[in-house]
Image (cartoon, grey):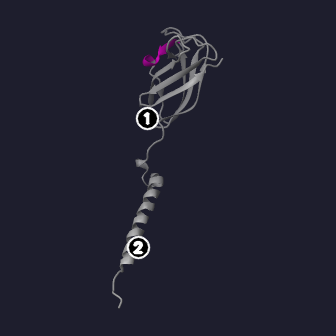
Amino acid sequence: MRRAGLSSNRIAGLIVGTFVALVVFGLILANFGYLFFPSNTKQGPAITFSSYQLFSGTNSTVSYTNTCSGDAYLVVDMHNNTPNNVHITNVTIYGASLPHNATTLLSVSNNSCLTLAQSNPEVPSNSDYEFVGYLTVALPPLTNCYFSMQFDNGQNLSSLMVAQT
């Protein structure tokens, strides 16, 4: 005689099938959830960097009346991927081959050469930005040194570089 209702094999199959379906749905949601819930997606890095170059030469000094006049400078091309403006808070050049750590200065309005704290450089939201910082130390050609760049969103960039001529 057959009993009306579900057999134990069918119940076990239903439980296993449901579990497998939930796992597959979870994997799909984890990988493609941004299509269903765009506000819950994680953004990529706030700032992405496309290139950076260090150039050798003479140093610059802080001046409220003259533009930066040294030949040693750092160029960093970046893109801000967020809807918020981000500020560069510190850029330092350092290494054993330098007499001391160098900070960077910015030419402002063609009539001053100021520290980052004084100029407060801003990387605009959702846009490209080119940072040009003049070094406070003379840099011989082919000098190996590091640079470190910090932002007010907590992001940092560090790299070993060779000063180009």
Residue 73 point in image, percent of width and height:
57, 17
Name the residue carrying label 1: 84
Distance from the alpha carbon under mark 1 to that under mark 2: 51 Å
Between label 1 and label 2, give the one nearer the viewer.
2
Asked if the residues shown at circle 1 and circle 2 are in contact, with their CB atoms under 8 angstroms apart, the answer is no
What stretch of residues is rendered in magenta? 111-118
Q: Earlier in the sequence, mark 1 or mark 2?
A: 2
Pick the quarter of the image with the C terminus: top right
Name the residue carrying label 2: 13
Q: Is residue 116 magenta?
A: yes
Residue 35 point in image, percent of width and height:
47, 54
Examine the rendered structure and indicate whether residue 128 appears above or below residue 141.
below
Q: Residues within 10 Å of mark 1 (few under 14, many from 20)?
A: few
Examine the rendered structure and indicate whether residue 8 appears above or below residue 107.
below
Instruction: Assign a secondary structure to mark 1.
Output: loop
Disc 1 marks which amino acid? Answer: Asn
User: Number of labelled discs?
Assistant: 2
